[in-house]
Image (cartoon, helix red, strand yellow):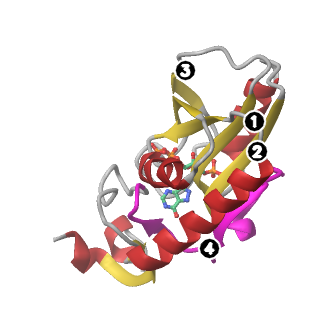
Amino acid sequence: MLEQDIERVLFTEEELKQRVKEIAQRIDADYAGKEPLLISVLRGSFVFMADLVREITLPCTVDFMAVSSYGGGTTSSGQVKIVKDLSEQIEGKDVLVVEDILDSGNTLSYLLKLLEARHPASIRLCTLLDKPERRTKPVAVQYTGFTIPDEFVVGYGLDYDEKYRNLPYIGILKPRVYGGE
Ligand code: PRP
Ligand code: 7HP
């Protein structure tokens, strides 16, 4: 069972639902009269994206990009790989990048630069979780769900070694699972 590897629940399903709704309301207000393109950074953000987009009432479109920098471990390798690029052009569009977690900033500083070079009308970042203590590269973020301490978390799309993404809540993983104390 996945449950036995969880040290403690950080955010319950209900707390996540409530926060996602609040973020969607801000997005609705900020993008009124516009038609934002939401870009989900796979794989981790697929659950958050699916919930967020259903709380947004504005007309919007979605696209997906897959990047990887963690390999199988709990720290970024520093090397960002584009595994799948967008299906559509973003030039002239109001782009909102949707992520599950901002940690070292390595992935997003790379990705935002890459997307800016394609000349969107605007680009903003929405992350469900932010771990500011771990930041090594500065990243400007406009929408944050929760600021969390430096603990390795899983669930609601977030993985360790590709597992735990299907937990409906976010929990701290027991360090023994990844060879910690
Ligand atoms: C996770 C997460 C972010 C990145 C954040 O992706 O989805 O993209 O790490 O970490 P950083 O700020 O230290 O770069 P991961 O590489 O684990 O891939 P995944 O989305 O497939 O889980
Ligand atoms: C990436 C990542 N993936 C899952 N849980 C965390 O705490 C993470 N930080 N960075």
Circle 3/circle 1 CB separation < 8 Å: no
Residue 148 coordinates in the image, percent (x, y): 63, 75
Q: Which residue is mark 1?
A: 34
C-alpha distance separating marks 3 and 1: 24 Å
Vertical arrangement, residue 170 with respect to residue 39, above or below: below
Q: Which quadrant would the N terminus be assigned to in this image?
A: bottom left
Density class for disc 2 (Cα within 10 Å; few <14, some 14-19, many ≥20) is some
Report the amino acid beneath label 3.
Asp
Residue 128 coordinates in the image, percent (x, y): 59, 60
Q: Main secondary structure of the magenta part?
A: loop
- Per the rendering, the mark at residue 31 is 2
Secondary element under disc 2, as helix, strand or loop, is loop
C-alpha distance separating marks 4 and 2: 32 Å
Question: Is 87 in the magenta?
Answer: no
- Looking at this view, name the residue that lies furthest to the left: 1
C-alpha distance separating marks 3 and 4: 30 Å
Q: Nearer the viewer, residue 23 or 29?
A: 29
Q: Which residue is mark 4?
A: 150
Q: Which residue is mark 3?
A: 85
Residue at point 52% right, 73% down?
Answer: 18
Which comes sooner in the sequence, label 3 or label 4?
3
Which comes sooner in the sequence, label 3 or label 1?
1
Vertical arrangement, residue 92 with respect to residue 46, above or below: above
Q: Which residues are magenta?
A: 131-157
Density class for disc 4 (Cα within 10 Å; few <14, some 14-19, many ≥20) is few
Which comes sooner in the sequence, label 4 or label 2?
2
Left/right placement of residue 75 relative to residue 108 reads left
C-alpha distance separating marks 3 and 2: 25 Å
**Residue 101 in view:** yes
